[in-house]
């Protein structure tokens, strides 16, 4: 795995809101991304400004399209999920200063976290530049893409998350809008919940998972069994069930609901959340449904929980 920082101009005035993330390189700078590969991690630095493009209309006339104001710092980071390749039919861009650039090469990214920020001065200092460094011409061949060390990447990610730490507020429940565990909790449910919350990284086999809350009450009257955060600062709503049958959809629905409510109340950027369904057994049909709706599911052998309880006692 390699680690990178890439610089982007701010989005243009006519850019779609759901524009997909990429690492971009001009045609003559392909060599700068020769080592870029799927699985690599990339910090994305947005400049404060960018060039105004001259766009041709269908009738042959032109219009100038400006960049929106940029943030001047790292705005997200992600994982490379495809090889660097040319974009079919991509034509050179022409700018109002008379220059052109052919952004012909790109590699797709999967965003891991948007919930944070590292400003220009702090990024420059972390990478050994003067605090006044502007990141113009950064990277190999002045391409805007440069490889950084694992420790530099980790330090910048830590600063990124420190800017927007997870904080779960307490709510005064004004109405009982959703299920909140009425009817009592079975010992099987309780012990599985406690097992997951005690050490979620081990219980669920994912490094970086941390417990934020158990039995977290939301203003709707719902109560999440366990709230976690993952290694990328995403909030995770966990629904615990002793067993999930083929037609028992409630657990998956609860996990999905918790995901988006927690994303909102914990002030995570849209998309920086996950949903987990945990049980001793889950029917194959429900596993398929979970996959279709981005719910991570986990089966934990009851014997593991019983052994943990005996050892704990």
Image: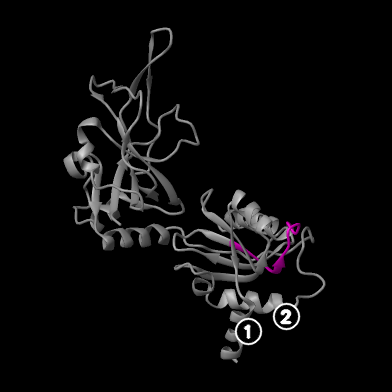
Sequence-earlier tag: 2 or 1: 2
Task: Confirm whether residue 159 shows in the render.
Answer: yes
Q: Residue 61: where, in percent of width, then height?
A: 38, 9
Front residue of 270/171: it is 270
Q: In this view, does 172 lie above or below 36?
A: below
Q: In which quarter of the image is residue 185?
A: bottom right
Q: Image point 71% across, 68% down: which residue?
A: 243
Helix, strand or loop for disc 1: helix
Q: Image point 23% across, 56% down: which residue?
A: 127
Q: Residue 124: where, in percent of width, then height?
A: 24, 52
Q: In the picture provided, is 158 more to the left or to the right than 254? A: left
Front residue of 54/229: it is 229
Where does label 2 land, which residue? 187
Q: In this view, does 208 lie above or below 59?
A: below
Q: In which quarter of the image is residue 58?
A: top left
Q: Image point 36% across, 53% down: which residue?
A: 39
- Identify the main secondary structure in magenta: strand
Mark 1 crowd level (few <14, some 14–19, many ≥20, 10 Å Cα): some
Where does label 1 land, which residue? 306
In the rendered structure, which segment of residues is drawn in magenta? Answer: 237-249
Task: Confirm whether residue 216 shows in the render.
Answer: no
């Amino acid at each position: 795995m390699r680690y990178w920082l890439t610089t982007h101009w701010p989005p243009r005035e006519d850019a779609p809101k759901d524009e997909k993330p990429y690492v971009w390189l001009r045609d003559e700078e392909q060599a700068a991304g020769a080592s870029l590969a799927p699985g690599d991690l990339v910090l994305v630095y947005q400049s404060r400004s960018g060039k105004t493009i001259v766009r041709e209309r269908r009738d042959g006339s032109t219009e100038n399209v400006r960049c929106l104001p940029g943030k001047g710092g790292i705005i997200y980071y992600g994982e490379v999920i495809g090889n660097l390749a040319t974009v079919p039919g991509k034509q050179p861009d022409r700018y109002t200063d008379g220059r052109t650039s052919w952004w012909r090469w790109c590699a797709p990214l999967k965003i891991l976290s948007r919930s944070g920020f590292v400003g220009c001065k702090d990024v420059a200092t972390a990478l050994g530049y003067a605090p006044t460094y502007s990141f113009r011409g950064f990277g190999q061949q002045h391409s805007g893409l440069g490889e950084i060390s694992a420790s530099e990447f980790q330090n910048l990610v830590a600063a990124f998350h420190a800017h927007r730490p997870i904080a779960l507020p307490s709510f005064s429940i004004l109405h009982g809008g959703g299920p909140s565990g009425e009817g009592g909790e079975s010992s099987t449910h309780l012990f599985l919940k406690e097992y997951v919350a005690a050490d979620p990284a081990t219980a669920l086999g994912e490094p970086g998972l941390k417990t934020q809350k158990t039995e977290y009450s939301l203003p709707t009257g719902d109560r999440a069994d366990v709230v976690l955060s993952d290694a990328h600062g995403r909030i995770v709503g966990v629904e615990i069930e002793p067993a999930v049958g083929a037609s028992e959809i409630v657990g998956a629905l609860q996990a999905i609901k918790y995901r988006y409510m927690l994303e909102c109340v914990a002030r995570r950027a849209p998309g920086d959340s996950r949903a987990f369904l945990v049980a001793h057994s889950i029917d194959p049909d429900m596993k398929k449904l979970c996959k279709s709706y981005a719910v991570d599911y986990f089966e934990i052998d009851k014997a593991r929980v019983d052994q943990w309880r005996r050892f704990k006692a």
